[in-house]
Structures are given as structure tokens and as C-alpha cells.
Amino acid sequence: MSLWTLVPVKPLRRGKSRLSSVLSEDERTYLNYSMLANTLHTLAEVHEIAQVLVISRDPAALSLAREFNFRTLQEDDEGSDLNLALKRATVVAQFYGATGLLVLPADLPLLKPVTVQDILKKAKRSPMMVIAPDRHEDGTNALLVSPVGLIEYHYGPGSFLAHLEQAEKHRIPVEVVHLPALELDLDLPEDLEILQEMDQTISYSLLKT
């Protein structure tokens, strides 16, 4: 399987607005940059991945991706949503011969190579969908599909169940993965508190400017 990973990235200065009560704009920008850098470092160490494609409107995010020799896709529409951006990225990956896709957000502070490899081990056949929800079992924090274009993307509130419904509709085998490193994303102040309880070193390094 020629596996590509898609990493959608919001503009670094605009992301994580729900943390504004505890972090300044500069702190949120640095946090977003740090988590993106960790994601790219992690993916660079997973040799099973054939290529990484970063999708963003933010020149800084795209520039960082190119430092890793990853491919980039510039979003050109301020009003485009995540699902449309991923659909465009999927077409690009398919054009270059991808046979499987792993969609990973850039805001998983605990992500490590072994975490990604644990996901890949679950993709034992094709067609197949491997999915990891957030800790609320509402959002989708990792989504692996083989072959490419197997389902429509339904990111947004309730995406976990929406993706499962897609799989059921098309009779696609599904593997649900529950891993702490995939369940914790940073959206709310309480998420920062949980991260600090789990790993104070990571929490400090992400916020150190």
C-alpha cells in the first residue's frame, strides 16, 4: 500500500480561539506551531508513510512542511471548509498513486511514531477504515482509509459517528482505535489541564516561547 498522510492546518494565529481565556494570541500561535512541528517530526520517522501532504492557507505552516520535504497544498478560498480541503487533497494524493490515506490533525500534543504505527497495524486489508475518536467520542482524531476515496469526509461536530455511519452504509470493515495519544487534542482550557497532568514536560515545552 502506498500510504499518504493528509495534515490539515488552520492559520496558526487563528487556531485555538477557545483557549483565549487562558492563552494570549502569541501563546496560541506558538502552541499551534509547536504541535504542527511535533506532528511533522513524528510523521518523518514513520517509514511506512510514502508521502505527507500538508493543507493550509497559512504560509508559515506550508513553509515548515517544506522543510521536511513534504508536499503542500495551498488553500485559496477563505470560505472553504475542512471537508472540501480534504477532498481536494485526496484528489492530489490519488493522482500521485496513493492507495491509502491517513488523515491526522496537527493538534495532538502526545503524538509519537509508535502511535501512528499502531494505527497502521490495524489496516490489515482493503477495503478498510481505521478510526480514532477524541476523548469525547465526538470528533475524529485519526482516520485511515484504503482504498483512497472510500468514504466522504464529514469533519465537524459529530464526525466520529458520521464516519462510522459512512462505513456502515458502504459495508466497509471498521477498526476503532482508542489510544490516549490520539484522544487528547487541545481545544479547551480543561484539555491543557489534562495534558499537564499526563506529561508536564510536554505541556511546558509547547507553551515555552
Image: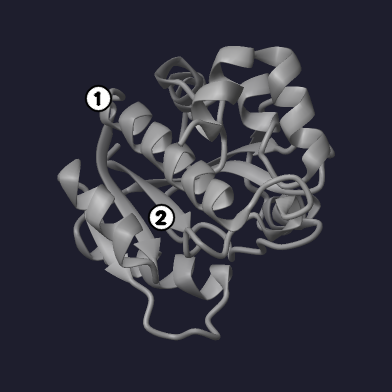
Q: Which residue is mark 1?
A: 47
Residue 3 position (above or below residue 178):
below
Where residue 183 appears, x then y in whole percent? 70, 31
Q: Secondary structure at mark 1?
A: loop
Quadrant assignment for the C terminus: top left
The number of numbered discs placed on residues in the rendered structure image is 2
Where residue 46 appears, x then y in whole percent? 31, 24
Q: Nearer the viewer, residue 169 or 72?
A: 72
- Which residue is pictured at 38% across the width and 62% down the height? 55
In the shown orientation, is residue 89 left or right of residue 133? left
In the shown orientation, is residue 21 left or right of residue 47? right
Q: Which residue is mark 2?
A: 148
Where residue 182 appears, x then y in whole percent? 62, 30
- Which residue is pictured at 31% across the width and 53% down the height? 53
Residue type for callout 2: Val
Q: CA distance from mark 1 to mark 2?
A: 19 Å
Mark 2 Cα-neighbour bin, 10 Å: few <14, some 14–19, many ≥20: many
Residue type for callout 1: His
Mark closest to the chain's N terminus, 1 or 2:
1
